[in-house]
Amino acid sequence: MRTSDFDFDLPEELIAQHPAPERTASRLLHLDGNNGAIRDRMFGDLPALLQPGDLLVFNDTRVIKARLTGEKESGGKVEVLVERVLDHQRALAHVRASHAPRPQSRLRLAGGVDVTVLGRHDDLFELRFEDASGVLDVLERHGRLPLPPYITHTPDAEDEARYQTVYARQPGAVAAPTAGLHFDRPLLDRLRQQGVQIAFVTLHVGAGTFQPVRVEELALHRMHSEWYEISPQTVALIEATQQAGGKVTAVGTTALRALESAAREGTLQAGSGDTDIFITPGYRFRVVERLITNFHLPCTTLIMLVSAFAGRDHIQRGYAHAIAQRYRFFSYGDAMLLERRDADKDSGPGQ
């Protein structure tokens, strides 16, 4: 398959610029990957679509205020977008400036924070924050929320509340795991009360999630890497759910990528590490039977992933239906509930 197989035209007015008034007020397109059936629902209908004993797996990463502005030693303007926090004082970041900063040069960022450029790793710069309070504290005090590039307004108080899941607890993401934005605490309580189990993984979402695949041959694409962690408790819950006949639903592509990464050797393993898993049609899923996800940008690895999960033909029909019915797209938009396509109905190269 080629990158152009995952392209589509989207009217600009369907790109949601603000969240729905209430988290659960979004729409939910229910798509069966086996027969292609499409049903229009509301996200608040989700409890009726799950059974006691089913398991929802959430990504509990927390979005950090990763964007900082400042100056180079020469006085030139600079913008920093932290991609990954390495330790208390070091981070990898995208740096935008008229000329790339040199190793061992200094940046003076918002709040008078000094940063030393330690070196460059491909497109990212390794930075040391000289403030003793550390990277995360500096970002919380002086950074701005890194809204996706297709959201055009300056981040405000609404964004700081709504571009974050209600269960976020592990700081490190520069983009929200947006499928989780539709859940509020009353909905989570309803699900628990009806016997739906809940588990968590962590995957710190990077800015690469928004980037289109820039090569036509998928085999030539170099996937961005993200850090994940899965606890023994989550592994045990998944195994118990499957043994009892329940279904495992990943809330978001990031939760799915973490789980499938941890099962690459055949069985799901607890642990942590980097993943660059690239899921395209033909991939054999080992862990997840259902996926809750938002609508994704054309020609990105995420629309390739959902095409692998539910079938490219079904996803194309689902997206065309969503556009015709005026669903809202991308991070602040509506959601899909996808039923996994049976492996014997898949087509395309495996990964």
Image (cartoon, rainbow, N blue to C red):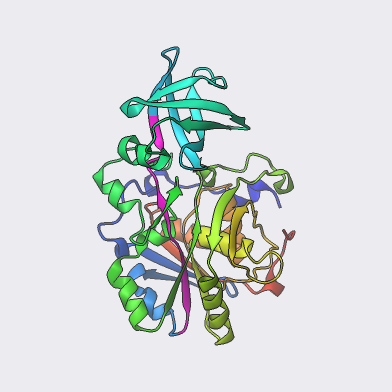
In which image quadrant can residue 236 be found? bottom right
Residue 138 is situated, as x and y percent measured from the top left of the image, at 36, 37
Q: Nearer the viewer, residue 184 or 133?
A: 133
What is the magenta range?
A: 53-68
Q: From the viewer's perspective, is residue 81 above or below residue 6? A: above
Q: Residue at x 40, y 53 (%)?
A: 62
Magenta stretch holds residue 274:
no
| Left/right of residue 109 with respect to residue 95 in the rendered view | left
Magenta stretch: dominant SS? Answer: strand
Q: Quadrant of the C terminus?
A: bottom right
Q: From the viewer's perspective, is residue 126 above or below residue 257? A: above
Q: Residue at x 58, y 79 (%)?
A: 239
Mark yes or no: residue 129 visible. Answer: yes
Count of numbered circles in the view: 0
Q: From the viewer's perspective, is residue 138 above or below residue 27? A: above
Residue furthest top as drawn: 74
Residue 164 is situated, as x and y percent measured from the top left of the image, at 35, 53
Mark yes or no: residue 317 visible. Answer: no
Q: Nearer the viewer, residue 298 or 78?
A: 78
In which image quadrant can residue 325 be found? bottom left
| Left/right of residue 29 with respect to residue 112 in the rendered view | right
Magenta stretch holds residue 56:
yes
Residue 273 is situated, as x and y percent measured from the top left of the image, at 60, 55
Q: Residue at x 34, y 46 (%)?
A: 17
Residue furthest front as drawn: 132
Q: From the viewer's perspective, is residue 246 above or below residue 130? A: below
Residue furthest bottom as drawn: 244
Residue 294 is situated, as x and y percent measured from the top left of the image, at 45, 58
In which image quadrant can residue 72 be found? top left
